[in-house]
Image (cartoon, rainbow, N blue to C red):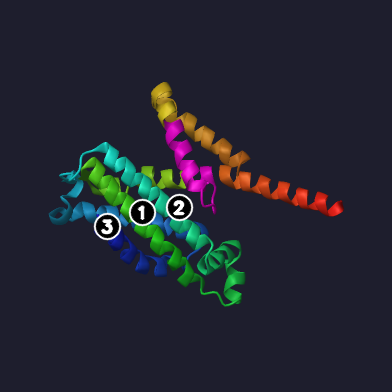
Amino acid sequence: MLLGPIMAAIISLPIGLICFRLRGPYFALAMLALGEIFRLLFINLVSLTNGARGILIMPVITSKVFYYYVGLAMLLTTIFVTYLIVHSKIGYYLVSIREDQDAATSLGVPTTLYKNYALLPSAFFTGLAGAFYTNYVAFIDPHIVFNLSNISVMVILVVMLGGVATTWGPTVGALIYIFLGEIFRTTLGSANVLVFGILVCLIILFLPNGIVGELNLVKRIMSRKKESLSGGV
């Protein structure tokens, strides 16, 4: 199970060095194109991946309780590592790159290098989640791994719902996405995708910073008002 995340981290290095020279939508398009290239590659490597038919895996442990606690431990570990990165020197450099990459470059920050530093743990934990999910469903095929129309879009929606550039945003976004998705699926049937899409669009329009991002914004505004009132007194 550890081989998957290690390989994902190793493969991410050359990809990051090449793709991080692109910005904005061009970077996103390059990553989507790479996902499709890998999907077609592994479909055609029949001797290695069994092609589109996939590979059945004999699970070592079948207890769902075990998978629950392992998943919970992975979640807490990911949040903890994210917190450490955000509050480290690397985290401050990444914030400067996010706010203004040209300004960060002019100040001597090696932007491509630090973006690769961020990509490594991201790829590692993504690979770990993929290995965990593969053991849980006991099956893997190229479509599951490189499903751009489902997994990639879901990850983006989760982050946008919870809040970009926040530690707790993706977790909150995932909880909301799964909770509402299950409710809409059972009550609305095939119309759930349309209703959920409209709801997501409304949240993005009225909460552009995500739920956690908007809460943090309100908290900062209230804190400034409190400081100004106390200063006036």
Labels 1, 2: front one: 2
Region in magenta: 159-181
Q: Which amino acid does label 2 sit on?
A: Ile
Q: Please tell me which residue is depicted at 82% across the width and 49% down the height of the picture.
A: 229
SS for callout 1: helix
First in sequence, mark 1 or 3: give its number.
3
Residue depicted at 47% across the width and 45% down the height: 171
Q: Is the magenta stretch mostly helix, strand or loop?
A: helix
CA neighbours of label 2 inside 10 A, class few (<14), some (14 to 19), many (20+) = some
- Name the one closer to the observer, 203 or 34: 203
The secondary structure type at the circle numbered 2 is: helix
The residue to which callout 2 is attached is: 79
What is the CA distance from the residue labelled 1 to the residue labelled 3? 9 Å
Residue pointed to by mark 3: 4
Q: Amino acid under label 3?
A: Gly
Q: Do the residues bearing badges 3 and 2 touch, measured as CB atoms within 8 Å?
A: no
Residue at image coords 31%, 56%: 37
Q: Which residue lies furthest to the left in this view?
A: 47
